[in-house]
Amino acid sequence: MKILDAGVLTPSFIDFTIPSSFARETLYYPVEYGDFFCDNSYYIERNFLDQYLIMFIRSGSLNVRLEGREGKAEKNQVVLLDCRAPHAYWCTEETEFLWFHFNGCNTAGYTKFLWDKFGSTIITPEEPERIEKYLEQMFRYLQAESTNEHLISLQISKILAWLASAEETAFGSKLFDPVIRHIKEHFDEEIMLDDLMEICGLSKSYFIREFKKQVGSTPHEYLLAYRLRQAKQMLQTSRQSIEEIAEACGFNSTSHFARAFKKENRMTPTDFRNIQF
């Protein structure tokens, strides 16, 4: 079937889905999808579409504009757009890209997370062939005689998760491996922010911002979470008192430990110790 959009060439294809109410309420779900071969007359511009869009560039390049900011996606890069904002994309050379519009789950939150991490709608994935494989598998599920919405949702989740694991620059998550190692080795001691900054040689504002972007929490949040994790293990595997565990995990007082533990777990350390797993 010939596609009527200007600039879309043979052998391009497009197909559509009818998601169930369960998928719309619970899963990630695609709305339409395709494999487009385009020339330099391909141009799409919208003010609003209540969907999200992922495009994987197989060859050529794709220019992208979102709310006035422009960029160019090259081969093996991924474009992630929130189509609810004014946007446009177009080709200036022959280009092939796999694409799908989707929604569901917490798509808005995941999209924001990826944008915050990469500072762009264009992402360079690690092992782009893996993204391509996930897309091809999703297309096979979509075109099967009996459609399995759970497996389709799983493929979208895999794509988002793999994008989230990519490093956008040389200052990737490995930059903070020594910091995380220091926290794990010294969590029972007093750890100051300045000590962690010195390990990386970064300014305070840049260190905190990049740590949260790459690791998913601030240095203080990560340290607290690691201490509480160790406390859980000790509560379940030792006969040490609550006071001893608080001290062994680096808390400056038992009351501080108890408050932090209850805030995170909605139960006291004693209540947690009494749970049978």
Image (spheres, rainbow, N blue to C red):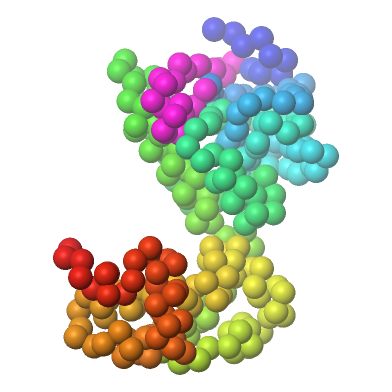
Quadrant position of the C terminus in the picture: bottom left
**Which contiguous range is marked in magenta?**
10-31
Q: Indicate the position of residue 174 as horizontal and vertical percent values.
A: 53, 71
Give the answer, above or below, for where 63 lies relative to 145.
Answer: below
Q: Viewer-proximal residue, 221 or 214?
A: 221
Residue at left offset 44%, top offset 75%: 259
Give the answer, above or below, for where 68 lies relative to 21.
Answer: below
Q: Viewer-proximal residue, 141 or 96?
A: 141
In terms of image quadrants, where is residue 202? Answer: bottom right
Could you tell whether 107 is left or right of 39 in the image?
Answer: left
Q: Indicate the position of residue 7 as horizontal and vertical percent values.
A: 71, 18
Q: How many marks do you count on the picture?
A: 0
In terms of image quadrants, where is residue 66? Answer: top right
Give the answer, above or below, for where 96 lies relative to 7.
Answer: below
Q: Residue furthest top?
A: 1
Residue at left offset 56%, top offset 28%: 101
Q: Indicate the position of residue 268 as horizontal and vertical percent values.
A: 33, 71
Quadrant position of the N terminus in the picture: top right
Could you tell whether 146 is left or right of 5 in the image?
Answer: left
